[in-house]
Amino acid sequence: MATILDGKSLITAEMIAASLPRGKLEPHSEAFETARVELALILHTTHQQIEQRKDPAEIIRRLMSYLEATRSKVHPDVWQALIPVVQNHPVLEYFLEDPLTRWSHDKPRGYSGDAQLLDYIYCDPHVA
């Protein structure tokens, strides 16, 4: 995923990541591998639910519940290592069909265009 900067943002993903304490995580540590396998199963199940055209709200609720539970039980370094697994999974395209999710995905956190997103959310007639 490429980070798009507009030259005005003060907060970048790199700045946030650099401020977090980091331990040395072995890429194939037992904790990481266990979490990665569990995550692969839930992403596979989510993908099946999408293909079966299940209720989108229920798909999102289940996946978010699992992701929140995983984040709370694993070490922050394990969680950081898992993020690319989710970002590179085919279910991402399903979630990016939502315009607000796509906007948030395409723009970095703290992007100066966040006001435009709020205009979009509140249906400002000047926003296409």
Image (cartoon, grey):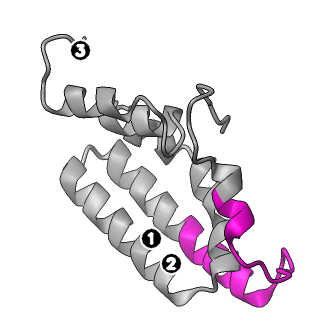
Q: Disc 2 marks which residue? A: 71
* Most foreground residue, 112 or 81: 112
* Magenta-colored span: 16-40
The residue at 82%/80% (across/down) is 25
The residue at 56%/76% (across/down) is 38
Between discs 3 and 1, the one toward the N terminus: 1
In the picture, the quarter occupied by the C terminus is: top left
Q: Report if the CB atoms under discs 2 and 3 are less than 8 Å apart.
A: no
Relative image position of residue 28 (x, y in whole percent) = 84, 78
Q: Quadrant of residue 1?
A: top right
Q: Is residue 71 above or below residue 108?
A: below
Instruction: Name which residue type carries label 1.
Output: Leu
Q: Quadrant of residue 99?
A: top left
The disc label shown at residue 67, or none: 1
Q: Is residue 29 magenta?
A: yes
How many marks overall? 3
Instruction: Name which residue type carries label 2.
Output: Arg
